[in-house]
Amino acid sequence: MTDTPSADRSTDSQPPAAIRARYRASAPQRATVLVVDIALIVLGFWVLSGFFGALAWSVVLATATWPLYERYKALFGQRWRRILAPLLFTLLIGMVIIVPFGVGVIEIWREMKGVMHWVANADKNGAALPPMLMHLPYLGSKITDWWNNNLAAPGSIADLIGRTDTGTFARVTQEVGLIIARRLSFFVFTVLSLFFLFRDGETLTIRLRTLCNRLLGPPGEYLVRLTVSAVRSTADGLVLVGLGEGILLGVAYEVIGVPHPALLGAFTALLAMVPFGAPVIFSLASVLLLVDGALPAAIGLELFGFLVIYFADYIIRPALIGGGAQLPFLWVLLGIFGGLATFGLVGLFLGPAIMAALISLWREWTDPVPRRLSQKSG
């Protein structure tokens, strides 16, 4: 084999962008390169289309926790920051997600054992109709008739289950298994992507800023910073406030005597991450108290729940999300619910970020004194 000239070797060692910048192509060649570039981008998005959800969640988690990760990484020596720091922090986030889920599964299993014990006892002796259901307006008589025909007599529950199509249970079990497998693979890819984002986040940030500057100029960097701020403030406003609501109402469930307070508190915290979602659970808890005949406790829980919702969803949450994203409260709500409807759960964070960028463009275009976004980025 013959040696390559030194000039050729130096050119081959340069990055592709530098080679293209020095290559004086004709107009047809530039058009061909553009077509190939677009085709590669479309092909790449097509290949990754099945992983967009996991990638989006990893980006949201990395963006929301990056300031905390920077402080955490500072505890490590220089030789451990490349692998060990992102690995341990990723595992920590994974545990934060897995542990509450595992506790919820254990609580559900315990409750299911109690339900199965009640079903067995009711099938042996007959299930008594709760007195509160008899007095419900419009529905009380219908519920009473159905209950007496299907649940009141000994052995009626076994007959009711026996009339159910066993093929339906098999299909439901298969579908549940597939859903669990998909969610598990989704979680694995999310955590794996999160590790690489923590490991290479600084390099990716530099390249993203470079890309935005080349495509949009200085306003592009401002929009990126605004989007990152919106994602972080939304994470604080949704997750932290939701957990606070769940803790307060969980304590209230325990004090008032609501059945299964830990499980209801966990579901309250989960739904409370969506504005106005917590009333679904504490209203259900009030209904359980009403069924047991505890009318004052049910009213007290409902009043306390709406008091918590008022301070959390009307004062604290708008201040956290709207302040960081520079959004009015109406646009915060539109971004959250619109993002949820469009992108699923990850839309809770993407929606306000998109609204923040859109409102920023609106303010620039409608400002009586024309200003460029580049002035804000300085």
Image (cartoon, helix red, strand yellow):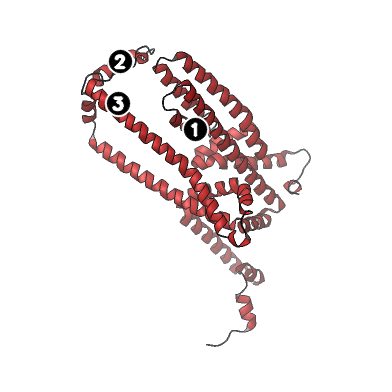
- Residue 140 picture quarter: top left
Indicate the amino acid at tag 2.
Answer: Thr
Label 1, label 2: how many angstroms apart (C-alpha)?
32 Å
Residue 228 position in % (x across, y down): 63, 46
Residue 338 position in % (x across, y down): 54, 36
Indicate the amino acid at tag 3.
Answer: Trp
Label 3, label 2: how many angstroms apart (C-alpha)?
19 Å
Total tally of numbered discs in the picture: 3
From where the camera sits, is residue 264 visible? yes
Taking the spot 68% from the left edge, 53% from the top edge, the residue there is 216
From where the camera sits, is residue 25 visible? no
**CA neighbours of label 2 inside 10 A, class few (<14), some (14 to 19), many (20+):** some
- Residue 213 picture quarter: bottom right
Q: Nearer the viewer, residue 365 or 59?
A: 59
Badge 3 is on which residue? 118
Left or right: 127 as drawn, with respect to 78 = left
Q: Earlier in the sequence, mark 1 or mark 2?
A: 2
Badge 2 is on which residue? 144
Label 3, label 1: how many angstroms apart (C-alpha)?
28 Å
Residue 93 position in % (x across, y down): 52, 47
Viewer-nearest of discs 3 and 1: 3
Please tell me whether mark 2 sits on a helix, a strand or a loop.
helix
Find out whether the residues at labels 3 and 1 contact each other: C-beta distance under 8 Å.
no
Give above or below for 352 relative to 316.
below
Taking the spot 49% from the left edge, 51% from the top edge, the residue there is 191
The disc label shown at residue 314, or none: none
The disc label shown at residue 271, or none: 1
Please tell me whether mark 3 sits on a helix, a strand or a loop.
helix
